[in-house]
Amino acid sequence: MGTKVMIVDDNEFIRESVDILFKFEGIQAVAADGGEECLRHLENGFRGIILMDVMMPGMDGWDTIREIVKRGVYDGNIIVMLTAKGEPDCKMEGIQEYVTDYVTKPFDPMKLIERVNSLALFRKGMKLAQ
Amino acid sequence: MRTTTKLIASNCLITLLMIVVFAMFSLNRFYAEDLHQEHKNLEKCIMTFWEFYKYKGTEFKSVGGQLLIGDHVVNANFEVPDKIQKIFGGVATVFMGDIRVSTNVMDDEGKRAVGTRLIGPAYSAVFGEGRPYRGEAIILGHPYLTAYDPIKDHSGKVIGALFVGVKKVSFQEKFDQIKTPIMIMLAVLLISFAIATFLLLKLTRRIERTEANSLNFLKTLMETIPSPIFYKDAKGRYLGFNKAYEEYVGMRQEQLIGKTCFDLWPRDLAERYHQQDQTLFENQGIQKYEGSMVSADGARHDVIFYKAPFHSQQGAVEGLVGVILDITERKAAEEEIKNAYQQLNDIIEFLPDATFVVDKDKRVIAWNLAIEKMTGVGKDEVMGKGDYAYAEPFYGERRPILIDLIDADLEKINADELYPYIKKVGRTLFTETCIPSVNGRESRYIWGTAAPLFDKLGNRVGGIESMRDITEYKRVEDELRFRNLLLSTQLNSSIDGILAVDQHFKIISYNKRFLELTHIPPSLLETGLHGPVINAVAELAEDPQGFQIKVSSIYENQDTSSRDEIAFKGGVIIDRYSASMVDEDGKYYGRIWYFRDITDQKHAEEVRLRLEAQRHHSRMMETFVTQLGHDLKTPITPLFALIPLIKEKIVDPDLKRMVEICGKSIAAINELTEKALKLVKLSISTTGLLEYIKLAGIVEASIHSNRDILDQKKIRCENDIEPELVVVAVADQLIELFNNLITNAVHHSQTGEVVQIGARQTGNTITIAVRDNGIGVDPADLENIFDEFFKVDRSRHDLDSPGLGLSICRRIIANHHGTIWAESEGKGFGMTVFFTLPLQ
C-alpha cells in the first residue's frame, strides 16, 4: 500500500518505536519531533496519515493543526490524535472537524496498525470520491 | 421825561415866547417909532435953537464973562430959549462953559435955573470930547429926552453948549395907553397857555407814566421769560434782546445791537434766518420753525423759532420779534423716551414668557416672540385687533381670558368656572389651567398672570398678560414626585442603615434600617441633633473613641468618600460608608452615612476565600496530575508498541514468556497509573456538566464496553432498569462508575454467573443496585471496601485489580451528592453495591 504515515511526537523513543512498528508492517513512515518539523514535511509535499501527539512543548498538537489549516497544507491528509486519557481537550474547540480519529496512549501496536490501515482505505475512498 | 412830553412842553414854551416876543416887539416898535419921532422933534428943536441964534450973529464968542453971538448977549437973555419953549414946548438952555447962562428950566422955587452947572455924561461928551450928546436925563424930577450940542468959537474951542429937552411925559402916556390892554391880553393868553400846558403836561405825564409802567411791565416780562427773545428792525438789524438771549449766546447787548444775522452767525444759519425773516415779512402772522442756534458754548443746538412782525401805528412793518425755544433737551428727552419705549418693547419682545399687552380698548399693542412661538400666531395677525382676538390662539374662539378678569369680582370668576384655579395678589391675577390644544399641541398646562397698566397719573391705559407653558414642568414635577417616592422607598427598603446630615450638621434623613441597626430612639433622631446621634452610634462600636476620631476627620474633608469596617459590640461587623453630597459645581450640601451589617457576609467571605484557595490548589493539582499522567504514559507507549513486536520475533519459549511478563507488568503499571490519576482527578475536580441522562442507556453502554471481560468469563450482565428513567448526573462519571462496578463484579464472580443491575425510586431519590453472586465480603470489611487499595483477599497480590475501582465509585457518588454502600451476606454469598442519585 502507498499510504505514508507521519508520527509527530516530542518523545524520541515513541517516534522511533512507532517508526519500527510501521516499517515492520511495511508502512512508509516519517517522524517529526514537533509541530514545526511536521509543517516542514507537509510543505515539502507530505500527504498521508498524521499521528499527532497532543502534549508537546512549544507548539502543541492543536496549535499545529491550526497552523496546518492556516498554511493550506491540510488537504490530502488524515489527522489522528494521540492522547493520554484524561488530558484536557478544551483547546480543540473549533478544529475537531480536522481530526478524523483519536488513539489513546499507550496504544496496542496491532490495534494501531489496524486503525491506520482502515484509515488508509478511507483516505483512498475519499480521494476517489473527489 | 419822555420825548413827547418834552416836545409838548417846548412847543408850548416856544409858542408862548413867540407871543411874548411878538407882543414886545410890537410894543417896542411902537415905542421906538415914538422915540424916533421924539428924537426927530428934539433934533428939529435944537436945529431951530441954532437957527434962532444964527439970526443973531455968525459966531459965538466969549467976551468978558459974557457969551456973545454977534453982538447979542446971551447971558440972562431968555428971548431965544423961551421962543423954543413956545414952539416945541420943551426946555432950552445955553451954557457958557458949563454954567447955564440962559434957560427956561425952572428950579424948585420957580426961578430960572441960571448959574447951575452941567454934569454927567453930557458934560464929558460935550466938553471932554467936543461932540454932541443925546440921551435921557432927569431934569427937575422929570424924565427928558435931551440933546446937547457943543458951542465952538472960531478956533474950534468948546466954549459952551446948547441944550434942548423934551419932557417924556406925553410919549409914555400914549405908550401906557396901548400897553395895558396888550399886557392884559398877554396875561390872559399866558394864563390860558399855562393852564393848557399844565393840563397837557399832566396828561402827558400820566400817559407817560402808564406807558412807562407798561414798558416796565413788558421789559420785566421779557426779562423774566427764560426763553431767549430778540427783536430786529425791518432791515434785519438787531434792536434788542432779553437777558436769556444774552446768556444763551454769551454776548452783551452792546456786541449785538445794530448787527445783522450775517454779522453774528455762521453763513448757513444766517441765510436760513434771513430767508425765514423775509417769508415772515411777506406772509405776516406768527411763524414757527425748527432750526439751529449757536449757543454760548459754541455748539449748535436744536431750537424752535417763534417769530412775529410788529408794525408801526400806520401799519408798516417795523421789525420782528423772535422767541427761541431750545429743544435740544426736549429732543434728547424725546429721544430718551423713544429709547425707553423701544427698550420696554424689546424687554417685552424678548421676555421668556409668552406675553401680550393691550391698550385700554383691549386692542393688542404688543405680542412678543415667546407668544408667537407658543401660539404659532404672528404679530401681524393680532396686532391692533380687539374684541378678544388674543383668545383665539388658545381657545379657538373669542372669549374673555385672564386679562379680561382683572376688574372682575373673584367670587364670580370662580363661579364662572373660566379657570379652575385663580388667585389675586394686589391687582395681579394668577392662574393655572389646562388648555386642550395650543398650536397643535395637546393638553397644555399654562400658568398665567395678568395685571392692569397705569400711566404716571394713575389712569388705566391697558393690561398685560404673561403665560408660561408648564406642561413640561408638570411632567418633571410628576417625575420628581415619582423619583422622591422611589428614593424614599429605596431609603426605607435599603439593607443599609442610612443617615443624612446637612452642611449645618443637622440630621435631615434616616431610614428604618438605621433604627434597627443602632436601636437609637426615633425621638432622638427627630431632634435633628447630630452630636447626640453620632455619640449614640459611637457607643455601639468596640472603639467609640476611634469611631469619633474617624467621623471628625471625615467631616474635615468635605469632598472625600470614606469606607471602612467597624467592629460593633457583640461581634457585629458594620461596613461604614460615607459620601459627601456635592453638586456639579462643587457646592457641599452635607454627607450621607451608610451602615451595613456585614457580619454574615464577612463569614461567607471567609468561606469563599477558603474555597477559592482550595480551588486554586485543586487547579494546581489537576495540572500536576495531568502532566504526571502524560509523562508516565510517554515511556510506557514505546514499551507497549515494541514488546509485542519483540515477542513476535522471539522463538525461544523461555524468552517469549519473559517478554510476556514484561508486557503484563507494563499493562498493570498502565492500569494503575490510569486509575490512580482518575481517582486523583475526581477528588480534586468535583465539578462536571450535569445532564438529564437515561440511566438504562448508560448502563447498556457500560455493559457493551466491558463486553470483552464479560465474554471471557461468560458472565451475563442483566440491565433491569426501566428504560425511561432519567437521572441528573455527569455522563462521563456515570459511565466510569458503572465500568468500575461491572469490572469489580466480574472480577469477583465465577465463570458463568450473573450480574444484575436494577434501580428503585423512592421520592426524589433513585437507589441503584449492582448485584453479583461472587465471593462476597466479610460484613466486618464492608465499610472498608471503598478505601483505596483495599483487597478482599489480602494474601493475593492481584495485578489485574489495582484496588482503586470502588474508591473511584465512592468519589463519583460523593460528587453527585449521593451515598454509596455495599451489602453482603458474608463470604461466598456475593455482594450488592447500592448508590443513590437525585432524580431531578
Image (spheres, rainbow, N blue to C red):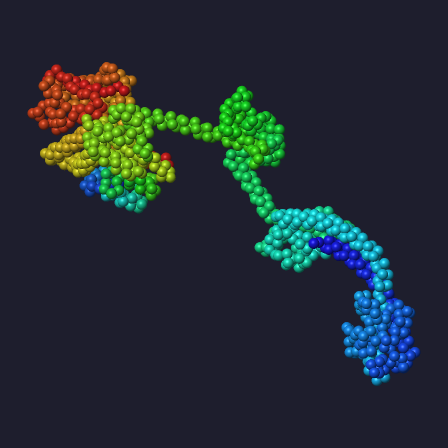
In this rendering, position of residue B172 left or right of residue A100: right
| Residue B169 x, y percent position in the rendering | 84, 63
| Residue B245 x, y percent position in the rendering | 62, 52
Name, please, the residue furthest toward the left. B795
The quarter holding residue B90 reads: bottom right
Name, please, the residue furthest toward the bottom. B155
In this rendering, position of residue B55 left or right of residue B583: right
Quarter containing the C terminus of chain B: top left
Viewer-side residue, A11 vs A62: A62
Name, please, the residue furthest toward the right. B55
Q: Looking at the image, can residue A19 be seen?
A: no
In this rendering, position of residue B103 left or right of residue B816: right
Q: Looking at the image, can residue B238 be seen?
A: yes
Viewer-side residue, B389 vs A61: B389
Counting every numbered tag in the picture gives 0
Quarter containing the N terminus of chain B: bottom right
| Residue B150 x, y percent position in the rendering | 83, 77
B826 in relation to B166, above or below: above
| Residue B279 x, y percent position in the rendering | 73, 51
B76 in relation to B351, above or below: below
The structure residue drawn at horizontal position 62% and vertical position 48%, both measured from the top left corner, is B224
B794 in relation to B121, above or below: above
The structure residue drawn at horizontal position 21% and vertical position 23%, both measured from the top left corner, is B817
The structure residue drawn at horizontal position 28% and vertical position 36%, both measured from the top left corner, is B555
The structure residue drawn at horizontal position 84% and vertical position 80%, both measured from the top left corner, is B66
Viewer-side residue, B488 vs A55: B488
